[in-house]
Image (spheres, rainbow, N blue to C red):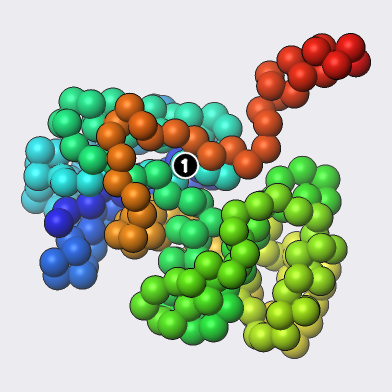
Amino acid sequence: MLILGIDTSGKNASVAVFDTDSESFLAGNSICTQKTHSQIIMPMVKNILSQAEKKLTDIEVIAVANGPGSYTGLRIGVSAVKAMGFALDCKCAGVSTLKALAYNNIACKGVICAVMGARAELVYTAVYKSDGYSLETMVQDCIMNRDELAETLALNGEPVTLCGDGSPDFFTEYRSQMFTIAPPQSRVQSAYGVCLASISAEQVSAQELEIAYLQKVKAEKELEEKANGR
């Protein structure tokens, strides 16, 4: 099965093609650019498919990081995948950005904690146990205070590999012999992790594909405040 993976949840735009039969990536790339993801993501898809010597019609599942992450980035990525899914009438898979980050570090056996900056002292986070090939979820995707996360990891009592854009600050603030931080290239979101995470993800139609923000967007907060008379 050929999987096209896309990640636009952060600063990088990333695309990859994974062949589950050979368990290998046929092509992939990540770009950090000043251009918006909407300007570059489809040209990247075209380029990566060309490098893999595949056509879009060869793709059987299109996977995308569907949250948490940049609101604008997530909308661009999910919208692009929905459009391709409708056009090709193929299955789609929305993948947790946090789980995809953990899959970037799947070779690190033991506990893996993905940490992404949210706002103020809050972080998006999830905790997994890796056997080097697959992940077992220990803490589901959530948003919590950094102190609470540090306490949760300490109570677990096992060494932890930290990844995600929020991991450097967290590692520095709560420096501990229990914590190991992933190398820079493995801390950032990528389509490689999205592809790997999508293998065990639920496949849905393009119409059913949704974004998982984990917290209300600004417009929702404003409407809620108006309704409450604030």
Residue 63 visible from this viewpoint: no
Compared to residue 218, the image places residue 179 above or below, namely below
Residue shown at the point (23%, 40%) measured from the top left: 91
- Residue type at tag 1: Asn
Residue shown at the point (84%, 63%) measured from the top left: 147
The mark total stands at: 1
Frontmost residue, 110 versus 174:
110
Residue 211 visible from this viewpoint: yes
The location of residue 85, given as percent across then percent down, is: 24, 32
Q: Please indicate whether residue 142 sits to the left or right of residue 212 in the image.
A: right
Frontmost residue, 97 versus 36:
97
Q: Please indicate whether residue 143 sits to the left or right of residue 210 in the image.
A: right
The location of residue 208, given as percent across then percent down, is: 36, 32
The location of residue 57, given as percent across then percent down, is: 10, 38
**Residue at label 1?**
66
Q: In which quarter of the image is the C terminus?
A: top right
Frontmost residue, 26 versus 33:
26
